[in-house]
Amino acid sequence: MKQPKLVRDFIPQIIQEDPERTCDYYIADDNEYRQRLFDKMREELDEFIEDPSYEEAADMYEVFRAICLEFALSMDSVHNVAAEKRAQRGAFFDRIILERVD
């Protein structure tokens, strides 16, 4: 591993259960945790771009859930606001690319 990164909660335990592996880890403070969440979302998005799959989508979803929880945003409310915006402004299904506004 090149540099420390945010991992899922059970990863240290999974590594330590292998008799041939060990790991060192620490618990991030609030500021670092938030930055690492954003870094992790970028990482997961890059992986999804390379391999659009349920597994990669699930990883992005899990990071998104953690980000929302960290900023005290309920997933139900996020879902409701998204539905309202979709009803008022549409979604992204029609593939519209805005080129210019005068």
Image: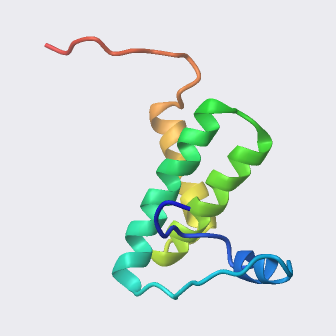
Query: Measured from the top left, where is residue 30 in percent x and y?
Result: 39, 84
Q: Nearest the camera: 95 or 88?
A: 95
The answer to whether residue 54 is above or below residue 34 is above
The answer to whether residue 102 is above or below residue 41 is above
Query: Measured from the top left, where is residue 19 in percent x and y?
Result: 86, 81
Left or right: 49 in relation to 51: left
Residue at image x 55%, y 60%?
Answer: 78
Q: Quadrant of residue 24?
A: bottom right
Left or right: 22 in relation to 96: right
Q: Quadrant of the N terminus?
A: bottom right
Residue at image x 19%, y 15%?
Answer: 101
Q: Quadrant of residue 79?
A: bottom right
Query: Measured from the top left, where is residue 70 in percent x and y?
Result: 48, 77
Left or right: 36 in relation to 10: left
The answer to whether residue 9 is above or below residue 35 is below
Query: Measured from the top left, where is residue 47 in percent x and y?
Result: 61, 41
**Which colour style is shown?**
rainbow
Q: Quadrant of residue 96?
A: top left
